[in-house]
Amino acid sequence: MSRSAADALERKRRKLGLLTHQDALLHLPLRYEDETRIMPIARLQPGMSAQVEGEVRAAEVQVRPRRQLVATLTDDTGSLSLRYLNFYPSQRAQLTPGKRWRVLGEVRGGLFGLEMIHPRLVSVEAPLPDRLTPVYPTTQGLQQRTLRGWIRQALATEDLSDTLPDAVRQQWHLLPFADAIRTLHEPPPDADTGALVEHRHPAWQRIKLDELLAQQLALAEARAHRRAQRAPVLPESIDTASLSERLLASLSFTLTAAQQRVVAEIREDLTRPWPMQRLLQGDVGSGKTVVAALAAAHAIAAGGQVALMAPTEILAEQHWLKMHDWLAPLGVRLAWIAGSLGVRQRRAELAAVASGEAQLVVGTQALIQDTVQFANLVLAISDEQHRFGVGQRLALRQKQADHSLTVHQLMMSATPIPRTLAMTAFADLDVSVIDTLPPGRQAIITKLVNNERRLEVMQRIRQAVADGRQAYWVCPLVEESEALQLQTAVDTHATLVAALPDVRIGLLHGRLEASAKAEVMAAFAGGQLDLLVATTVIEVGVDVPNATLMVIEHAERFGLAQLHQLRGRVGRGRAQSVCVLMYQTPLSALARERLRCLHATQDGFAIAQRDLELRGPGELLGVRQSGTELLRFADLVHDDSIVEHARQIAVQLRHDYPEAAQQHLARWARGRADFLKA
Ligand code: ADP
Ligand code: MG
């Protein structure tokens, strides 16, 4: 082979990701061809891939409708046409009448009976293989023959010994690794090819399990690694108990059992010498904010500083107001750091944070920028953590003044994480779940309303306002252009102002100055506005319990999770709330499915599960995709039972067979475990 041809081949090999023999072993077939048997021609059916053997009876070059070579092949049972649209003189010579060939190809029904287009010819002298022939995913210009050669070589030279001890394998009814790999690449003729192609075969199950097991082991290592780090210890004391009690006593409600449980879990973590990394999950309206306040109170009373961060300034400001209401009367010193602060005020706040005078600092992600220096940050709380990237979480760690200590982290999310995702992508975190809503909440009534009935919807707003309630009107999402989105919001606002002269209407969108946003939000929260026309900036966290009507225009354009979040802005008080999803026909099948799901349930968990099925894990996770990107074989939507097995086997291996665990990781994870430590 010439140098450049070899280089080209090497490039193709890299393109397929086949850098090592191990990679070649795990390059698994898409389907199989059966060359182990010869079919009687009479049994051929259109659509079938088959091998027949017979004698060439006739061959001619036809010129109409185009130049082509057509031969007739005959066996004891019947005849078949072989058709070559482009052909070489050598092929013509091969197909001279009287010669016998074995012929492989796909059968189709032609004008004059069955035919194969461009079938492969094999000498009748060649021994019949005793295994099915794999067909691999390939790239342009790379022949199956070449790929098969590489993979056969890998099968011959690689160590296929099992990483799982026999006892474990038998307990879980798993095929040996070597058998699984060989079955996948060279199945026996009687193998269930349907199960192989659909990845249901026990050989596939073993490979998926191995992959998920490697992931679980890597995550377990990441956790162990975290336990080896040091964090500020924040012990329970008279001070911590007293501040928490005073906060609880000042609330207008008592904590639900679920809230009490998660608060206890978090407190427990804070008393440990290793960093907490806890995900606090709770559906919209489940009351995560007060849990954050109690966590902060514990850390502050133990002498540390706490940062509370939100993804948007609107949400951060809401948190600030709430924390201020709750904690300032108890003597806690708060600082507010936002992009919109004036220079002098910002400098003063920064100084208070740097000196340690400010005990609770609230803001957006700007808090983890370099300019903010903390005196003694011990706990970082982030709301809606799925919007925080791994990089930002790392930056947070640098904020602890004693660099040998790692800050405790609490991440709050209203996006319910389906179990399989929780066990995989988030398995390096501890998870606390608030699984019940505060008492007295009524289910939100969700109505699907055709866009043409907007006058009725406006009437509904008038009525709600007359009853002393408030409402949101969410403007349509315009993904193509932010300017257009803004224009739509402005237009909608103008239309509603004209149509509803008795209603006090505010407008909130992403382009407003932060101070203007805060003003509008404060007016709505304070009841000086009845209706808030908004873009999706209100998606997260906004909490105005008197608002009982949510109208979402062009709901068909939004994603499931987003609609669930938006709907969660109502139903926060004791009054009956209604969410009106206005849609424009015709609806795509997917949009119809989303609206149907939202209409059918208010259970965020069920909605997330449906979202996972409709969209796949990548989108659901947003930035933090690391865990799932590593999966090539397993599928989190369909293989949830394997995920569960992998989790249990990982625990078993680490406990009883640590060497096997290391070998397994070495085979599967290679350099990837390090990445997960972030
Ligand atoms: P989310 O979990 O969506 O952030 P919030 O923390 O904003 O929810 O709480 C939603 C509303 O429920 C707030 O008005 C909050 O004050 C109220 N709330 C929280 N916990 C309770 C409780 N145990 N009993 C009654 N109301 C509560
Ligand atoms: Mg919230």
Image: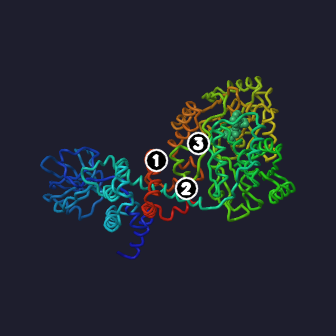
Q: Are marks 2 and 1 in contact (CB under 8 Å)?
A: no
Task: Name the residue type under label 1.
Answer: Glu
Q: Which mark is residue 644?
A: 1
> SS for tag 1?
helix
- In the rendered structure, are the residues bearing label 2 and label 3 in contact, judged by CB atoms less than 8 Å apart? no
Note whether ligand 1 is within 8 Å of mark 1. Answer: no
Residue shown at 74%/57% (left/top)?
Answer: 377
Rendered image: mark on residue 626? 2
Label tally: 3
* Residue 451 place in picture, x, y as percent: 63, 30
Towards the viewer: 473 or 600:
600
Coordinates of residue 565 in the picture (x, y in percent) = 64, 39
Q: Quadrant of the image for the C terminus?
A: bottom right
Task: For marks 2 and 3, give the one nearer the viewer.
Answer: 3
Circle nearer the N terminus (2, 3)? 3
Q: Are there few (<14), some (14-19), or many (20+) residues within 10 Å of tag 2? A: some
* CA–CA distance in space, label 2 to label 1: 19 Å
| Distance of label 2 from label 3 (alpha carbons) | 18 Å
Tag 3 residue: 416
Of circles 2 and 1, which is in front?
1
